[in-house]
């Protein structure tokens, strides 16, 4: 029997950093039968390829469980309530339950006799509603129309629970840490304390109260200890290990100090470090909460994409119109779509003519004319005429589903600095522990007391507490992202902020990003018989009430100039060509060159028309009584700051590209106007991400700036995705950075802010490592060897706190950041 290779994706629970992801990868990669394993920490997904005859899915689950993590089936469950007719007793309900439980894909089933409904959770990738209904019918009962259908996003629910739990833990920690800090540090700066806890007169009360306040904080952060120490046992230390060791060392030394106080050594009251443990845990919990909130945005983008799909479709069966759930549409079904409705699935028009708004998929604002034989895309909006089309792609095969898949695949790129911190911590922890143990043992062997050796051990651990290392990146990122928001740049996380400073190429979507995304009248050319004002009045009178973007642009220009309308009669739309109308008894045609040629009208302004087209404008011809009298040009005009922003990016050493579905002539005209380096024209929606991949394949770090749903895969594929604030919600959710004011100068601001922040982080990391490099030997007693003083744990803790304060203070300098948007 041939070996069968299986590719599968599973969710991973319990990971807290990239070191955890690497641990899972290493473990599985060593197993016989596993061809390759890749864990994406950002999306918490394991992609594994394995030989089914050598290792099973269950064995993979158990292997991962054995190293402290849990795998879950990566699937989307849906939830439905199906009313059932014909049930008369509890045995009937039980019979339906037994029947449905046998279906592959049913996760949970509950039949309620009182409400006469079956509540079912099922895997939509394995099971269709029609199959569930059939099984109910086979059991001898009637499956009635579905009352309600709602998608159950298990991933979203799990993340929300995680966010809520972290927030509660942080609040609890903060409530106890605030008074603890006051008690521990307040008296040092002259703040009053109640006499009963005065450290000089009642040292044990002073110490015990701090202990009581610290314990709830450590309980709130218990997961740092369970995960951190388990990682140590597995020889895969991570950031949690650093937190656990550092806070445990401070806590244990605090307990030791209490013991000494009880023995009568009241001077130890000044060597309590409970507040150190509490503050570290509280700050880390806050960081974990913010990280969880940021991760939650990933699934929201997918949910919003899914929300673009209509819930039902009208299918023609035996000449009758039947409304069915979209999941039940089959390839070959004839679907009816009325004006204003969304097209449910992909297909080919078999009857009718219309205009379809595909902007939610293509980003282009002008509706596309559709006739018999033309393709339509699920999720787009039918604007005018009713059509019938044959379904050619349904479910996972539709264009919208493909975009969803592309977003899922492209999201979650790793930030190098975050990865570096985890790698370093993997060596840092065992090295520090080794130094602490070695130093304390050596001092003991030289004849020093147990207390002396213990002091050395704890001093090394306390001074090497990872607080400075842990705060170096997040504090700068917090200040940097906050400063970004002040400047209209919403940065969703540290990874985006870190990557942005490495960007060498920026790809701009054209429509709605470089341009306004709304057509405007730019030119009115006449032969001389009629004035420009007359031409505009006639055109606006003809287009009055139009919902076509070009017509709306003409009517808006007419309205802005406060002109009068003329009476128009016998309006006739000519799909794909233009309109025909009677005004003041004369025949008026308004449309493209094809319309003029079909009516045998001499085109005498062809040179002017070509010049307009070369400038990226759409010429609309107007004829009166079969005589061409003028041209009205409409174009999607360039935004005010687009050219300035691109010039500034060039001065910053960044290459600029533009991507669009428009024809090459229009794209080149816009590109020339604003100074684009690379023009990518006539690019299909699903190919935008491929163009980004090509640029990345040249070794470039690429940012993508867009606003449409069709931009979402490219935004996710890019090293940094940037969405403009006036765009779609899905584009903004898929992006790493959102320009709140829709000003392209904010792209410049984002890059400058990223560069300033990364410079700050590097300064922080340098200080943190330099401090540890110098501090650890001092704590180990190097000076004492040469007759110098022994570093007391109290001073070790003070040094650690100073290190942390220095890092935070340096990060706060970013508050003075101001974007340089001038010429230099």
Image (cartoon, grey):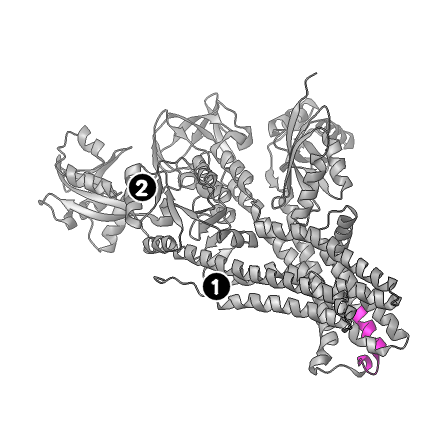
Residue drawn at (73%, 36%) of the image: 61
Q: Is 3 positioned to the left or the right of 410 in the image?
A: right
Residue 613 picture location, percent across and down: 23, 40
Say which quadrant the N terminus sits in: top right
762 left or right of 665 in image: right
> Between disc 2 and disc 1, whose residue precedes?
1
Query: What residue did someone put label 2 on?
Result: 667
Residue found 64% across the figure and 43% down from its top: 44
Q: Residue beneath label 1, please?
A: 486
Which residue appears farthest toward the right when viewing the image?
263
Label 2 packing within 10 angstroms: few (<14), some (14-19), many (20+): many
The residue at 69%/81% (across/down) is 189
Which structural element holds mark 2? Answer: helix
- Residue 159 position, x and y percent, is 64, 48
| Quarter of the view holding residue 343 | top left
Region of the chain picked out in magenta, as a range = 196-211
Q: Position of residue 644 (x, y in %)?
A: 33, 56
The secondary structure type at the circle numbered 1 is helix
Q: Which mark is residue 110?
A: none
Seen in the picture, residue 288 relative to 452 is either above or below; the reply is: above
- Along the line of sight, the residue nearer the viewer: 462 or 597: 462
Q: Which class describes the residues within 10 Å of circle 1: few (<14), some (14-19), or many (20+)?
A: few
Picture quadrant where residue 92 is located: top right
Q: Main secondary structure of the magenta part?
A: helix
**Residue 445: image location, x then y, percent:** 87, 62
Q: Nearer the viewer, residue 318 or 800?
A: 800
């Amino acid at each position: 029997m041939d070996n069968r290779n299986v590719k599968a994706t599973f969710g991973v629970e319990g990971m807290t950093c990239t070191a955890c992801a690497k641990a899972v990868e290493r473990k599985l990669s060593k197993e016989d039968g596993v061809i390759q394993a890749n864990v994406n920490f950002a999306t918490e997904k394991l992609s594994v390829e394995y030989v089914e005859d050598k290792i099973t899915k269950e064995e993979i689950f158990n292997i991962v469980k054995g190293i402290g993590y849990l795998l879950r089936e990566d699937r989307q469950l849906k939830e439905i309530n199906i009313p059932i007719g014909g049930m008369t007793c509890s045995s009937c309900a039980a019979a339906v339950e037994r029947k449905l439980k046998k279906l592959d894909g049913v996760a949970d089933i509950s039949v309620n006799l009182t409400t006469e409904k079956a509540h079912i959770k099922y895997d939509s990738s394995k099971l269709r509603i029609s199959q569930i209904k059939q099984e109910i019918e086979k059991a001898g009962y009637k499956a009635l129309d579905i009352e309600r259908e709602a998608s159950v996003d298990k991933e979203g629910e799990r993340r929300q629970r995680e966010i809520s739990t972290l927030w509660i833990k942080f609040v609890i920690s903060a409530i106890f840490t605030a008074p603890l800090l006051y008690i521990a540090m307040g008296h040092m700066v002259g703040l009053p304390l109640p006499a009963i806890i005065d450290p000089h007169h009642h040292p044990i009360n002073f110490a015990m109260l701090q202990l009581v306040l610290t314990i709830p904080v450590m309980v709130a952060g218990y997961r740092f200890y369970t995960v951190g120490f388990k990682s140590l046992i597995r020889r895969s230390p991570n950031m949690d290990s650093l937190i656990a060791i550092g806070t445990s060392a401070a806590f244990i030394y605090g307990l030791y100090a209490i013991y000494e106080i009880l023995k009568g050594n009241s001077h130890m009251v000044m060597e309590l470090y409970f507040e150190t443990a509490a503050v570290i845990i509280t700050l880390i919990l806050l960081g974990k909460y913010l990280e969880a909130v940021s991760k939650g945005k990933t699934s929201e983008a997918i949910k919003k994409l899914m929300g673009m799909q209509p819930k039902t479709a009208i299918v023609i069966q035996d000449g009758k119109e039947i409304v069915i759930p979209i999941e039940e549409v089959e390839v070959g079904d004839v679907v009816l779509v009325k004006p204003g409705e969304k097209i449910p699935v992909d297909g080919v028009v078999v009857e009718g003519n219309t205009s379809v708004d595909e902007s939610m998929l293509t980003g282009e604002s002008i509706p596309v004319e559709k006739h018999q034989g033309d393709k339509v895309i699920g999720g787009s909006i039918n604007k005018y005429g009713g059509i019938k089309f044959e379904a050619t792609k349904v479910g996972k095969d539709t264009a919208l589903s493909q975009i969803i898949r592309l977003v899922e695949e492209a999201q979650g790129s790793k930030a190098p600095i975050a990865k570096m911190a985890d790698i370093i911590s993997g060596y840092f922890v065992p090295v520090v522990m080794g130094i602490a143990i070695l130093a304390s043992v050596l001092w003991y062997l030289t004849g020093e007391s147990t207390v002396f050796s213990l002091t050395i051990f704890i001093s090394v651990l306390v001074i090497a507490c990872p607080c400075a290392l842990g705060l170096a990146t997040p504090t700068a990122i917090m200040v940097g992202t906050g400063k970004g928001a002040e400047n209209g740049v919403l940065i969703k996380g540290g990874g985006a902020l870190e990557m942005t400073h490495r960007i060498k190429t920026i790809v701009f979507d054209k429509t709605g990003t470089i341009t306004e995304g709304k057509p405007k009248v730019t030119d009115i050319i006449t032969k001389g018989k009629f004035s420009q004002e007359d031409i505009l009045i006639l055109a606006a009178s003809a287009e009055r009430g139009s919902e076509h973007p070009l017509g709306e642009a003409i009517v808006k220009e007419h309205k802005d100039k406060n002109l009068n309308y003329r009476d128009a009669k016998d309006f006739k739309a000519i799909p794909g060509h233009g309109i025909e109308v009677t005004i003041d008894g004369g025949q008026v045609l308004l449309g493209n060159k094809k319309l003029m040629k079909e009516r045998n009208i001499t085109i005498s302004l062809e040179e002017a028309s070509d010049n307009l087209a070369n400038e990226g404008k759409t010429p609309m011809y107007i004829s009166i009584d079969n005589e061409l009298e003028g041209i009205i040009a409409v174009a999607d005009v360039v935004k005010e700051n687009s050219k300035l922003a691109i010039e500034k990016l060039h001065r910053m050493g960044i290459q600029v590209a533009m991507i669009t579905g428009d024809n090459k002539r229009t794209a080149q005209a816009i590109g020339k106007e604003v100074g684009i380096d690379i023009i990518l024209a006539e690019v299909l929606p699903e190919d935008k991400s491929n163009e980004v991949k090509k640029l990345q394949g040249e070794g470039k770090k690429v940012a993508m700036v867009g606003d449409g749903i069709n931009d979402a895969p490219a935004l996710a594929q890019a090293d940094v995705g940037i969405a403009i604030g006036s765009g779609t919600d899905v584009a903004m959710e898929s992006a790493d950075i959102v320009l709140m004011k829709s000003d392209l100068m904010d792209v410049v601001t984002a890059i400058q802010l990223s560069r300033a922040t990364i410079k700050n982080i590097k300064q922080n990391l340098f200080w943190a490592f330099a401090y540890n490099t110098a501090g650890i030997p001092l704590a180990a007693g190097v000076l004492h060897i040469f007759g110098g003083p022994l570093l007391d744990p109290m001073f070790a803790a003070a040094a650690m706190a100073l290190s942390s304060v220095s890092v935070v203070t340096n990060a706060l300098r970013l508050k003075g950041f101001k974007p340089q948007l001038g010429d230099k």
